[in-house]
Image (cartoon, grey):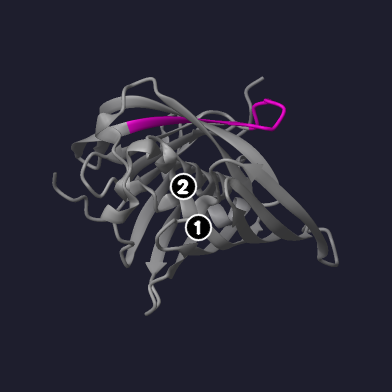
Amino acid sequence: MKKKFNLKEMKIGGVAVRLLWIVAALFYVGAITANAETWQVPKETLTYDVMYKWGLINKKAGSVAITTSIPASGERFHSRLTGATAPWADKFYKVRDTLRGTIDSRSFLPYRYEKVAYEGGDFNHDELAFSHSGNTTKATVIHRRKRKKDTEVSTTSKELQAVGPTLDMLSSFYYMRHLDYASMKAGQTVRLNVFSGSQKEVLTIHFDGVEEVKIGKKKYPSYHITFTFTSGSGKKTSDNMDAWLSTTSAKIPLLLEGKLPVGKVRCFYTGVIPAR
């Protein structure tokens, strides 16, 4: 029996935000050849169209924007990501997600991370406060949750800890400008820890080499990356996802792609693509 199209079941907006989150984590690939002193955090806004594809259907399902602001001191900067479903998709599964982060301008390690998510009538609010000691990262997590059928918001708290590179979505995103992908070989992989809301995951990143990617009517050379998420026990927690980054010095994520129970979701960069 053919599966009936059900947008609510696919959670397009949530997948799109996760796609941008995993591409952020790839910026640790090749970090041993990176020089953090050669890149300064810019004031900018990057925008994306979220497209849903299923057979002949190829329709805009939402949008995502990432904005960077820098206080006068310059020691820390702020990042804000917003994601929303399109009006037609709101009727099936309305999504309004906001992520905020405070990040060190030199080390790019997070101080604070917050996610406020309204998805299909459910409410989730995560707040993480980070501390770093040597190679160990700890985070105090406060998680607030209210399902559509609930009358009150429930609040829980916990502590997360990991040894080795440990990031959240927004802090890791800013590694992209100072990593030397050109010196990497196809097939290279790297593993790192990710604090995703109230849980810790292991992300394995596979560098697939240089490929052409089509954005609009033009094709651009890009770095192709594949991602795999697993739990601490090694169990796969989601399908593989892919990203293509421009080979220019900006290394802007041009296309992100992930599978859904029916079809797939693709995020296309909609800003000005810099020349080589």
Q: Residue at x 40, y 23 (%)?
A: 188
Q: In the image shown, does 149 or 173 lie closer to the viewer?
A: 173
Quarter placement of the C terminus: top left
Q: In the image shown, does 233 or 32 lie closer to the viewer?
A: 32
Taking the magenta stretch, the answer to whether it contains residue 9 is: no
Taking the magenta stretch, the answer to whether it contains residue 235 is: yes
Tell me the element at label 1: strand
Above or below, comparing residue 173 to residue 232 in the picture = below
Residue 98: x %, y % from top left: 55, 63
Tell me the element at label 2: helix
Above or below, comparing residue 94 to residue 27 in the picture = below
Residue designated by label 2: 20
Residue extending farthest to the front is 134
Q: Give amino acid for label 2.
A: Leu
Task: Tell me: 224 left or right of 170.
Answer: left
Task: Tell me: 75 left or right of 117.
Answer: left
Q: Residue at x 51, y 58 (%)?
A: 84
Q: Residue at x 33, y 21 (%)?
A: 186
Residue designated by label 1: 83
Stretch in magenta: 224-237
